[in-house]
Image: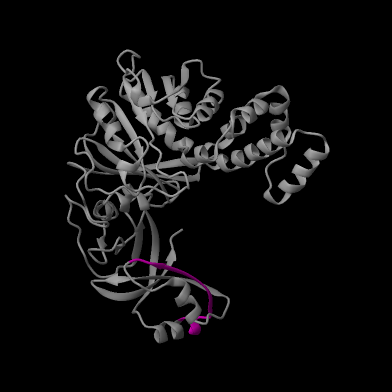
Amino acid sequence: MDASTLSKLLSPDGWALLGSLPPYDEQRAMALAMRLREAGVDPDLAAAALTQSRLRAKARAKLGGFADGMLFTPDGVEQATRLVVAALHARRYLAAGVTRVADLTSGIGADALAFAGVGLRVLATDVDEITAAIATLNLRHFPEAEVRHGDGLALDLAAEGVDGVYADPARRTRGGRRLFDPSAYAPPLDAVWALRDQVPALGIKVGPGIAHQGLPADAETQWVSVDGDVVEAGLWFGPLAPAGPGRSALVLRTVPGDDGEPRTLTRTLRARGGSGGAAPGGDDDLVPDVGAVGHYLYEPDGAVVRAGLVAHAAAELGGRLLDRTIAYVTTDAPAPADAVDPATGRAPVATGYRVLDVMPFGLKRLKAYLRERGVGRLTIKKRGTAVTPEQLRSQLSLKGDAEATLVLTRVDGAQQVLVVEPLG
């Protein structure tokens, strides 16, 4: 979007047009565009309004109803923090006693919106002029939030009265390819975390695929998942990490409330003592038991796995690993009461299954097993095996009305098939 198109959208006629559009439907978008053209709507304005309608529909999954009053860029939607996570960011700063936050890479303003929403004064910056203009619009209801077009790293933080800093560096190329090298972020990660010498209350959102090796030892590095999707990792310094440095996993799950409305279930696992490189499924400071398959199988949440806290999950669930290098936990009894949500009976840190059968992996044996039980619908999960689920499914010649769930994995180094059913 260029400045001219943005001006048309922000005109009374443009804003009214955007508000009058029906909920976005990709299959009807072309017909709607033709109707707008026939009605004499400026083609550029019609295209911009339809684009915003599409972006709002996509952003609704992250920002809920707030998206309906906002403008977006495609990159801004991709990088915007989910509202439920942004609210937790804001509470960190509030609990740390911060009063004025500098959001150095505000994008379209999702995190700045959450900061302002809890009463923090916000100074937001973005190097892209159009993005900064859109953020200004999105924060229009918060007079305590100021947006500037410019490089946030060039701010005189002391002169601005900033006592908290937040940054969400861009982690994609212009072509949309993900960047995994922190030095290639925009701005580079080293340049951002050096600011903790000026403002100790520093938070940085990074990609969840960031490697453990090389993470700053004075930060709490937290991986966050929302309903099973690992959405980010965050580096939190100084007063924003009250529990001290280390690795943690924050698991957020949407569950039905007592009144029927959805509520967010929150669970945190933590390992203290630095962010050193733990292998996936293992921990630096906790050695898990390894043993035979029990009556139950638990698949740790992705944030737990990324944080290297599978052993902590096993301890919370009262279980052991099937294999020291595989992120599956098995137990002889259901998860203990203090590990489950009392309303749902589910363990937030892992998805639970009841084990129905265990057998060595073999195509002929497995095919006969499923045929005898009339299994025609099959869910295949795997860890620690080279078997491709799609290829295996085609080889099994499934027939019947029954359904089953298989877990292909290693048990004490040997390839095994676990037949399971989801708990609950």
**Position in image of residue 168 (x %, y %):** 39, 35
Q: How is the image coloured?
A: one colour
* Residue 375 counted in the magenta span: yes
Vertical arrangement, residue 97 with respect to residue 202, above or below: above
Q: In this rendering, does residue 260 appear at all? A: no
Vertical arrangement, residue 6 with respect to residue 319, above or below: above
Identity of the residue drawn at 41% across and 67% down: 381
**Position in image of residue 299 (x %, y %):** 36, 59
Please indicate whether residue 219 sits to the left or right of residue 253 in the image: left
Q: Nearer the viewer, residue 81 or 191?
A: 191
**Position in image of residue 151 (x %, y %):** 39, 26
Identity of the residue drawn at 64% across and 40% down: 51
* Residue 166 counted in the magenta span: no
Please indicate whether residue 194 sits to the left or right of residue 38 in the image: left
- State the extent of the magenta-drawn residues as a range: 370-383
Q: In this rendering, does residue 372 appear at all? A: yes
Identity of the residue drawn at 45% across and 83% down: 367
**Position in image of residue 190 (x %, y %):** 27, 36
